[in-house]
Amino acid sequence: MATIDEIRKTRIKKLRIIEKAGFNPYPGKSKRTHKISEVLIDFSKLKKAGKKIVLAGRIRLLRPHGKLCFLHFEDGSAKMQALLAQNDLGEKNYKFFLDNFDIGDFIEIQGKLFKTRTKEKTIRVSNYRILTKSLRPLPEKWIGLKDEEERYRKRYLDLLFNPELKQMFIKKALFWNSMREFLQKKGFLEVETPVLETTAGGADAEPFITHHNALDIDVYLRISMGELWQKRLMVAGFDKTFEIGRQFRNEGISKEHLQDYTQMEFYWAYADYEMGMRLVEQMYKYVIKKTFGLLKFDIFGSKIDFNKKWQKIDYGQSIFDKFKIDIDKTSKKQVEEKLKGLKVKYDRNGSLGRLIDALWKECRKQVAGPAFLIGHPVSVSPLAKRDEKSHNRVQRFQVILAGSEMGNGYSELNDPLDQAERFKEQAKMRVAGDKEAQMHDKDFVKALEYGMPLTCGFGVSERLFSFLMNKPVRECVLFPLMRPK
């Protein structure tokens, strides 16, 4: 059996033969008149018209039988059969095709339509032209799940040989477009905010750092979908805004986590977190129904019905019920001992709030959802407004599905003095070694001093889509980041 290098050398020789015959193996224009999908739909009408049509696509199968050659080709919209006959093309042109065209090549075909004896829709070729000469052979059978790393490195082949995977990404586009459609129907304006920031804000995460040559300064890739920028827009008088885009967090890889991923965040002036929860429930049902056509799912073993009443779970009560720890009275030492007993990894430099949150995440594993988590302490919510009934709690909510967080929102903190103090506390945490603590954004505090109306903000990432697909989030990315070989 020939090696890849030997096949490549042979195909380059064929390419030179094609060039020597006066043909460009990589022309810049096609004369295609129809997509294959259009031909298959309107086959009878086009066949009856009796006119020659021009199709184009990649050769996926070649079956020469003496003076006849059947091939299958596809153009991204559908696959179809073509028949090349020596009597139609002439002996020279027929032989030229058999000698120099390979599976994987892109061709342009001119001819008339007919059906074979087995009723297969076919185009009878009267003329052909090379559009792209492939130099590497397509694998006879793609390895699929047998080698995950190879699939990710050659995702283009994975997509080519796996129609279900391709359909998943078409579905993913529908997922984001339906979310955009829902928000626009509700009067939200789509905006774009900076990806490069001098202060990374809007989330608890470690940012990526890069250098801006023109300004000669280090900048951060954003860790939120413009949270602090969109809130500046609330100061500026905008009523409802949202953004869908890429954000970047320098954190670990897991079935739920990526370093760069798509997120949506909206901000709604004169709304509180209760109004936010109602809107989010409507949005999730709309997007999920539009994307998947149903509202009942089995996600990693959890049976979830989005149509049922969404449960509300209290943060502190959940921890007390499971671990008998009162989050308002506990100490860092007590929480550390509990985490050690549970064999849960935690950051020894983390604040008491961080450690308590690690306990909550153990509780979260038992929640199938759909549910809203409420009653978060101030210590884990530096950008949320305090609850008027309980000064140590904030008006925050998280969507919980299949034991994981699937969205985060709150009544935004618009008290500039309180915000400044919380930023100072976060700065102390950074000095103590907490790389995910938020930076003190003095310019944002200054903007708040001009006055921001009460506002509800909410964000959800593509983790939601991956859970609905019942797949790790990395599998739901077209081209996951890989370490170079």
Image (cartoon, rainbow, N blue to C red):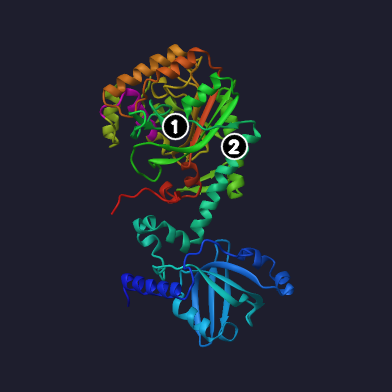
Q: Amino acid at mark 1?
A: Ser
Q: Which numbered disc flags the more N-terminal residue, 1 or 2?
A: 1
Q: Position of residue 35 (x, y in %)?
A: 61, 63
Is disc 1 placed on a helix, strand or loop? loop
Q: Amino acid at mark 2?
A: Met
Is disc 2 placed on a helix, strand or loop? helix
Relative to 293, is 404 on the left or the right? Answer: left
Q: Position of residue 58 (x, y in %)?
A: 51, 67
Q: Which quarter of the rendered picture does the N terminus lie within?
A: bottom left
Q: Position of residue 22 (x, y in %)?
A: 48, 73
Q: Is residue 119 above or below residue 474?
A: below
Q: Is residue 34 magenta?
A: no
Q: CA distance from mark 1 to mark 2?
A: 20 Å
Relative to 239, is 1 on the left or the right? Answer: left
Identify which residue is drawn at 60% across, 31% down: 189
Identify which residue is drawn at 57% across, 64% down: 30
Relative to 48, is 76 on the left or the right? Answer: left
Q: Which residue is mark 1?
A: 224
Q: Is residue 360 magenta?
A: yes
Q: Is residue 209 above or below residue 37?
A: above
Q: Main secondary structure of the magenta part?
A: helix
Residue 12 visible in the current orientation: yes
**Mark 1 residue crowding within 10 angstroms, few (<14) / some (14–19) / many (20+):** many
Q: Which quarter of the rendered picture does the C terminus lie within?
A: bottom left
What's drawn in magenta, residue-wise? 348-361
Marking on residue 283: 2
Q: Position of residue 33 (x, y in %)?
A: 64, 65
Identify which residue is drawn at 57% across, 74% down: 81
Residue 442 or 255: which is nearer the viewer?
Answer: 442
Mark 1 vs 2: CB contact within 8 A: no
Q: Quadrant of residue 151?
A: bottom left
